[in-house]
Image (cartoon, rainbow, N blue to C red):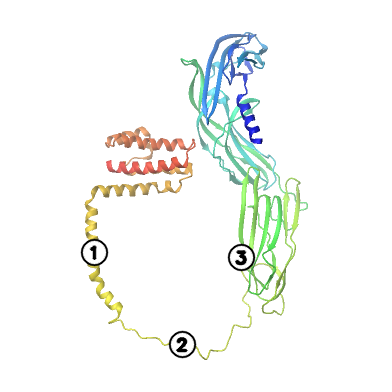
Amino acid sequence: MALFTISGIMMAQEDAVTFEVKLSKERLGINERLRVDFTMNKDGDNFSPPDFSGFRILMGPSQSISSSWVNGVRSFSKTYSYTLAPTGRGVFTIKQATIVIGGKTYKSLPKKVEVTAAVDKPSDEMTVDDVADQSLHLVAEVSKSKPFLNEAVSVVYKLYVSQFVNVTNFRALDNPKYNNFWSQDMPVTKYNVQNGTYNGKAYRYVILKRVVLYPQKSGKLEIEPLSLDVTIDVPTNRRDFFGGRVYTQTNKTVSAGKRTLNVKALPTAGKPANFGGAVGNFKFFVTASKTNLNASESLQAQVEVKGKGNLKLFQLPEPSLPSSLEVYEPEFEENVRTTLSGMEGKVSNNYTIVPSYRGKYPIPSISFSYFDPKSEKYHTLNSDEILINVAEGPSNGSIGAPGPISANRQAVVSTGNQFNFIKLKPNLVPIGTHYFFGSTNFYLWLLLPLALIPIAIIFGKKREAIASDVAGNRIKKANKLARKYLSDAKKTLGNKEAFYIALEKALHNYLKAKLKIETSEFSKDKIASLLTERKVDDNTQESFIALLENCELARYSPFSEVQMQQDYSKASEVISYLDKQL
C-alpha cells in the first residue's frame, strides 16, 4: 500500500504545473535594461503578459522551448522573454501574467523592481569579464570558527554559479596545504548541481572539495585558499537565427580566500594527570578473552576506546600487570571512518599474556581521560579490575607486584625441569658409507650430456625461426615498449585522475624517446605535424591525438573504469602501431 502511495505522490509531482516569472535583476539603474522570463513546465496557450507599467518594451516576446528525456522521464520548458527599459525612477511591480494549460488558467506571482539613478557602467555595457566576475563565486564554508585544540572542523568548498552563465570546465591552480592541521580529504566522486542562494540571490552551486581538519596548535590558524581556473560561457546581447542568446567563452580565476580559525587551548582547570590528548565523546573498555587457564597458556587482554573524536591522534593507556606475567608487544587495531562531523569508530590494543606460575593475578583498573568540547569538561572513565586465575602449573614463592610494561616479555625463569639424566640407551644409528663411482648418480651425470644434445639442436632451430620472423619480432618489441611506458598507468587503473596523468605522461615520454623533441613542443598541432612528417598514417595519428584529448577531459569529467580500460588498451595498440611506422 505504501508503494502505491509513494508512486502516486511522484506522479503527482511530475504532473504539477508551474508557471513563474524570473527577473535578470531586482535592482537596476535607469540607464540599464531588465530581462523578464515567463517560464512554464507544460505547454500552454493564450499567453497574456502584464502591461509592464513603468517600463518600455525594447524586445519581445521571444519564445523558446526545451524538451528532453532523461531516464525515461520527460522534461519540458517553455519561456516567453521580454527586454525592458525603465521609464523613470521608483519601485515598480511586474504584474501577473496568465496562461491556459490543460483548460485551466494559471497566473505568475507579481515581482517588485527598484529603479535607481543612472549607474556609471550599465550592465548591458559590461564586458564579458565583468559578467563573469559577478556570476562566479568560490566559497569555503567552515563548520566552526572557534574550535578547541584537536576538535574536528569541516571545510566544504562550493562553486556558486549564476543562472545566466554556464561552466564548461575547471581546474585547480593552487590547493591548500593545511599547515598546523591534521587533515583528511573526503573525495567528491560526483559533482551534483544544486540550487541555493548567494548574498540573497538565486544561484546554482556544486561541491568541489571536502576536508576534515583537526587543529594541532592553539591560537590563530590560517586555512590557505583554494584557487581555480574556470571556463564559462557568458551570454551576450546578440541573438541567433532562432532568437536564442549567443554565448561567448572566457576564463576566470576564482579563489575561496583565506579563512582564519581562532583555536582555543584546552582548559588547564580540572585537567586529569593521565590526560593523553583525547578530544571528543568516548567509551572505554578493558576485557580479557578468559580468566581461568593453566600456566604457559595464553590469553588476550584488550584495551579499547570507541566513540567520536580524534581517535587517530592519542595514545591508549597501558595496563599495569604483575611481573610474573609474560606480556608481548600489543597489536594495534583501528576501525575508524571519517565524515564531515569528524572521526568515529574504535581503536584498541590487544596484549598477549602468558602466565608462568599458578596463582591469582589481578589486572588493576585502568583509567582513561578525555575532553568533551560540547560540555567543555574533562571526563575520566575507569575499567573494572580483572582477576586471572591460573589453576595448574609450577608454583612461585612470591607473586610479583604490578608494574608498568617495559619490555616485550619478562626474563626467563627456571621451572625445575631444564636438566635431566643422561640417557643410557640413546638409540643411535650407524652412519653408512657411500661411494660415488658406480652409483646411480654417477651414471646419470655420465648420460646427461648425451641427453642434452637433441634439446640443444631443437632450441637452436627455434631461435633461428624467431630471428627470421622480422615482423613478429617487431610486434613483440613494440608490445614490450608499450608495457614499459604504460606500466605506471596500469597500476593506477580505477583511480581516474592518477590514471590519466600517468597515461598522458607515458604518451609524452614515448614521443620524446622516438622523435627526440622537448617537453615544450608538446602541443597537439606540433605532434600531428611531426607524425605527418614521419609518414604515420592518419588513423594512427587521430587515435594518438584522441588519447591526449581524453587525458585532458578526464580530469574534469566523469570517466568509468570500463572507459579507462578501453583507453589503456587503445594506448598500447597505438604505441605498437606507431613503433612500426617510426
Which element type, helix, strand or loop, lies under badge 1? helix
Q: Nearer the viewer, residue 384 or 96?
A: 96
Res 435 → quadrant: bottom left
Residue occupied by mark 2? 428
**Quadrant in which the N terminus is drawn:** top right
The residue labelled by disc 3 is: 329
Residue nearest the observer in this picture, 167 or 61: 61
The image position of residue 18, as x and y in percent, is 62, 21
* Residue on which the image places disc 1: 456
Q: Disc count in the image?
A: 3
In front here: 479 or 200?
Answer: 479
Amino acid type, mark 2: Leu
Q: Residue furthest bottom?
A: 424
Above or below, 34 relative to 316: above
Q: Is residue 378 above or below residue 448?
A: above
> Which amino acid lies under the numbered mark 1 shown in the image of this protein?
Ala
Judged left or right of residue 136, residue 324 is right
Categorize mark 2 by other alpha carbons within 10 Å: few (<14), some (14-19), many (20+).
few
Density class for disc 3 (Cα within 10 Å; few <14, some 14-19, many ≥20) is: some
Residue 307 visible, this angle: yes
Mark 3 or mark 1, which has the lower sequence index? Answer: 3
